[in-house]
Amino acid sequence: MLDDACLSNQFWAEAVNTAVYLKNISPTKALSNRTPYETWHGQKRTLKHLRVFGCLAFVHEPDERRKKLDYKQ
């Protein structure tokens, strides 16, 4: 994942967390093609929040933390 995203090894913990998360929301034969999340919580997990690992992202800064000439995104 790090190589595909062209990221350095300092992000290995984030890559491991992402891999475990994706494993937990993926169907498995042991649970009759249900996900561990679905088995534990009793409902399906929405996948709308997933993005490509290492993709460009922006952090929203609230108005009260920005100065007059700071970049707004």
Image: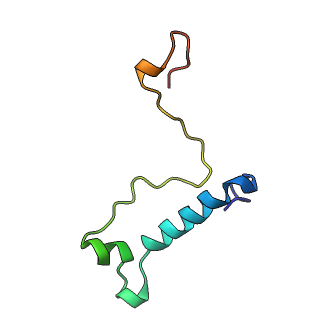
Report the residue at 62% width, 51% height from top. 54
Which residue ends up furthest to the left in the rendered image?
Answer: 42
Looking at the picture, how far across and down is residue 47, in whole percent? 39, 59
Along the viewing direction, whichever of 8 and 6 lies nearer the viewer: 8
Along the viewing direction, whichever of 36 and 64 lies nearer the viewer: 64
Question: Would you place residue 16 above or below residue 32 in this image?
Answer: above
From the viewer's perspective, is 5 left or right of 49? right
Count of number-bearing discs: 0
Along the viewing direction, whichever of 68 and 65 lies nearer the viewer: 65
Question: Would you place residue 25 above or below residue 8 in this image?
Answer: below
Report the residue at 74% width, 59% height from top. 3
Looking at the picture, how far across and down is residue 61, in whole percent? 47, 27
Question: Would you place residue 49 above or below residue 23 in this image?
Answer: above
From the viewer's perspective, is 56 left or right of 31? right
Report the residue at 49% width, 67% height from top. 22
For the N terminus, which image quadrant? bottom right
Report the residue at 49% width, 18% height from top. 66
Looking at the picture, how far across and down is residue 55, in whole percent? 60, 47
Q: How is the image coloured?
A: rainbow
Looking at the picture, how far across and down is residue 64, in whole percent? 41, 19
Q: Quadrant of residue 44?
A: bottom left
